[in-house]
Amino acid sequence: MAEKIKLLFVGDVVGLIGLEYLKKELKGLIESYGTNFVIVNGENIENGKGLNEEQAEEIFALGVDVITTGNHIWDNWKSRPLMAKNDRVIRPYNYPPGNVGKGFKVIEKAPGLEVAVVQLQGRTYMQAIDCPFRAADNLVKMLNERTPIIIVDFHADATAEKVAMGWHLDGRASAVIGTHTHIPTADASILMNGTAYISDVGMTGPYDSVVGMRKDIALKRLLLQTAHKYEQATDDLKLCAVYVEIDSESGQAMKIEQIILPKFVNSMYE
């Protein structure tokens, strides 16, 4: 059995421009970190909302094991047949029964070595769906009978809800990785009982924007308080991710490292 899982988790890929940047940079990251498991959140690729089969295949061709999504996956009808057809594209587990798609995927990396990927969605400032905490309890208990390695993408708006989920699953999940807000947080850490945690990985896409949207349009929405058509920004591309090392026997995280490529400029003279 492999000594450890070397996980690379890439945050929300925004727009086709974000997808192209992912295709440019991911191979080098996989090689430099020696990763053997890759997850990409792909819910924002199709003009900010959803993804289609062709885009998913482009991502898998890069060596990605699982694509996670979130609430915006439902905004694009092209995403639904994709989720029905390909169970490596997962959606939040705690949506009500009857929705298309799966909320988790177990991948066998080697004989006797399985990795479970779980998607949950928060409720604070979001849809009033089933409780993510109780859903996590039931699913993690079931998955622990197969593998100690469980990686959770918690797609949520409120930082407090994300932090609470981290503590709720500490020692029961290998990693709880926050997505959705598109802004990378500075709290990547190993929790008390061995779970790797970050409140938000950040987005992979244009940061000369308001979370991916053109700045002028976002400001019109806020200043005028009326609807304006979403238009994708294009400049200052970055890839945001975390690298996590996980002991394959215990399922505990040994290391978490935040990746921002290229780093933010904090001086006008750089």
Image (cartoon, rainbow, N blue to C red):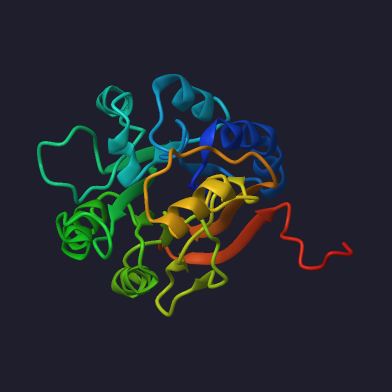
Report x, y in % for residue 24.
69, 33
The residue depicted at 57 percent of the width and 71 percent of the height is 186
Report x, y in % for residue 205.
59, 44
Q: Nearer the viewer, residue 235 or 50?
A: 235
The quarter of the displayed image where residue 62 is located:
top right
Q: Is residue 34 above or below residue 270?
A: above
Report x, y in % for residue 103.
26, 43
Q: Is residue 204 left or right of residue 1?
A: right
Residue 249 seen anywhere in this rendered image of the structure: no
The quarter of the displayed image where residue 168 is located:
bottom left
The quarter of the displayed image where residue 191 is located:
bottom left
The residue depicted at 35 percent of the width and 74 percent of the height is 160
Q: Nearer the viewer, residue 215 or 147?
A: 215
Residue 41 seen anywhere in this rendered image of the structure: yes
Residue that extends furthest to the front in the rendered view of this protein:
224
Q: Is residue 59 left or right of residue 167?
A: right
Q: Is residue 114 above or below residue 145?
A: above
Residue that extends furthest to the top in the rendered view of this protein:
54
Residue that extends furthest to the bottom in the rendered view of this protein:
192
Q: Is residue 70 left or right of residue 137?
A: right
| Number of disc labels | 0
Quadrant where the C terminus lies? bottom right
Report x, y in % for residue 243.
58, 56
The residue depicted at 41 percent of the width and 40 percent of the height is 43
Q: Nearer the viewer, residue 260 or 217?
A: 217
